[in-house]
Amino acid sequence: MKKRLSFKQRRILAGYLFSLPFLLGFTLFFFYPFIQAFIFSFNELVISREGFVLNFNGFDNYGYILNVHPDFLRIFVETILDTITNVPLVLAFSFFAALVLNQRFKGRFLARTIFFLPVILSAGIIIQMDIDDMVTQLLHGARNAELIFTGVGLRNLLMNTKLPEGFIEFILGAVDRIPDIIRASGIQILIFLAGLQSIPPSIYEAADVEGATGWESFWLITFPMMSPIILTNAVYTIIDTFLTTTNEVVMLVRDEAIMGAGYGVSMAMAVLYFVMILIILGITIKVSSRWVFYQE
């Protein structure tokens, strides 16, 4: 007589069956192409009538992009630095926006829709909008306002505060990134908003009874309980920043394969870029895991 599976075994089997589509998709559309790209990065790909031929050249492709290529190293470093700057700004803006949108006020649904519009609208439309002119018109064309919202005017204003030059450059860079930050924050706002609404109101009520201030409630309740969501959004934002179609490294990899030094060099760029993504994600998860709070 055939032995029946236990309840625990059936649950394990169901888990494997539910995971099977993901594993198949991961293998076919990610793992296998990555192995191919890794192999191509150590070869020169030559197109022939029969298809293509791989001529092994060792680390020549990597040596070329690191020592000879005129643009890769500069674009690579600039992209990494932009990511390190943009990710905290996107997280801070989206978390603040979610906190505001989680409050009860008239027009809350409309406000939530407006914050998510940058994700729906074409990125090209938003990039081409002249933000400075719009702000200046809203301020009734005041000359002083126009100067403030230009780089020179804002730089002079910050210089008068005697702040460190490095901090001033960071502020100026953040101001220049405002359209990109807003455009990249829509999904993060929704994730933060869902996390905020999952916190039981009874916890805040108990804190109010104990006499906790709003500031104390935020740091002792909201932030710890939102820390797993913050980590999730950080990982998502890093991956989204690296893989966006406007990323200069992604465009360089594509152009190099079609019109540049060849497919092997292009794949070497892609592999290095992928390794850097893994390193940054690993550091982010390792550092964040020390302060992430998981409710039991």
Image: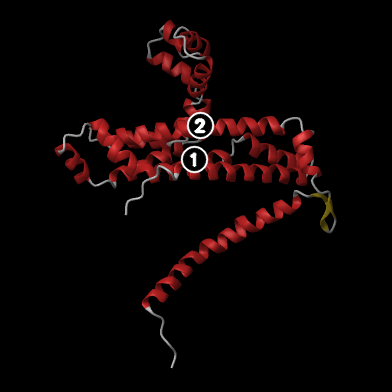
Residue drawn at x 51%, y 31% is 86
Q: Which mark is residue 273?
A: none
Query: Which residue is depicted at the point 69% across and 37% down?
Result: 252
From the image, which quarter does the N terminus lie in? bottom left
**Sequence order check, earlier mark of 2 and 1:** 2
Q: Label 2 to label 1, Cα distance in Å?
A: 9 Å
Asked where in the image residue 245 lies, by quadrant, the reply is top right
Q: Residue 134: x percent and y percent?
A: 44, 18
Residue picked out by circle 2: 86
Q: How is the image coloured?
A: secondary structure
Mark 2 in CB contact with mark 1 (< 8 angstroms): yes
Q: Residue at coordinates 67% horizontally, 43% vertically from top-left? A: 272
Helix, strand or loop at disc 2?
helix
202 relative to 219 in the view: left or right: left
Q: Is residue 124 visible?
A: no
Residue pointed to by mark 1 = 237
Q: Nearer the viewer, residue 149 or 132?
A: 149
| Residue 204 appears in the figure | yes
Residue closer to the observer: 179 or 14? 14
Q: Quadrant of the C terminus?
A: bottom left
Query: Which residue is situated farthest in the left direction here?
Result: 209
Few, some or many residues within 10 Å of mark 2 (<14, 14–19, 20+): many
